[in-house]
Image (cartoon, helix red, strand yellow):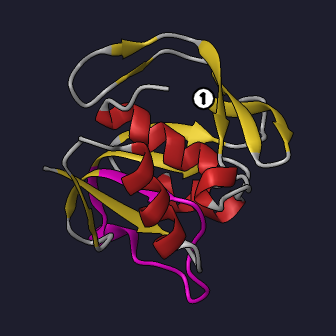
Amino acid sequence: MIKIGVLDKDKTDAIGDLLQNLCINIPIELCKPCNPLDILIVNSVPEKGYDSTRLSSKVIIANSDDKQVLELISTIGAQIITYGFNPKAAITASSHIDGAFVICIQRAIITLYGAPMLPSEFAVDFKAYGQADGYVMGTVAAALLCGAKF
């Protein structure tokens, strides 16, 4: 069972639902962010800040467009994969039209199972899942790490 946590101000449930839809036939469990996790998705920092010493994860998927997120994760020892509209992010969207993203993997990443994901682009239509914002890049990154195919 792959344990995934989400640190976000308000989209945790929607991200969990989207992960379940993207990771069909992959055993995942959504957990609180303070548990020892396989993957932690950090989209935003809660309003009152967050104690990063409570976070424990093998891989952190971080929103590189949010300076508070980058400050928070700078104190955590884990593999970090960034996503966002920032051109330096590992996972970006090369285009976004009507709920469909063309996701771009800009640098090779290694899945939790040790398989390499080489730089590439692929389209993902999120209209079916009711999602169409920048956070889907982090959710797709988590699904890729879990072994989902697009």
Residue 44: x and y in percent read 60, 67
Instruction: Answer left or right for 13 relative to 125.
Output: left
> Which residue does the numbered mark 1 point to in the structure image?
90
Q: Which is nearer the eye, 107 or 75?
A: 107
Residue 144: x and y in percent read 42, 32
Q: Secondary structure at mark 1?
A: loop
| Three-letter amino acid code of the residue under disc 1 | Ala
- Residue 1 falls inside the magenta stretch: no
Q: Residue at x 60, y 13 (%)?
A: 120
Q: Which is nearer the eye, 72 or 16?
A: 16
Residue 145 in view, yes or no: yes
Residue 149, located in which quarter of the rendered image? top left
Q: Residue at x 25, y 31 (%)?
A: 112
Instruction: Answer left or right for 97 relative to 72.
Output: right
Residue 140 vs 11, above or below: the answer is above
Residue 75 in view, yes or no: no
Q: Residue at x 50, y 26 (%)?
A: 150
Please give the range of residues in magenta.
39-57
Residue 49 vs 63, above or below: the answer is below
Instruction: Answer left or right for 106 relative to 29.
Output: right
Q: Residue at x 55, y 47 (%)?
A: 138
Instruction: Answer left or right for 127 relative to 42.
Output: right
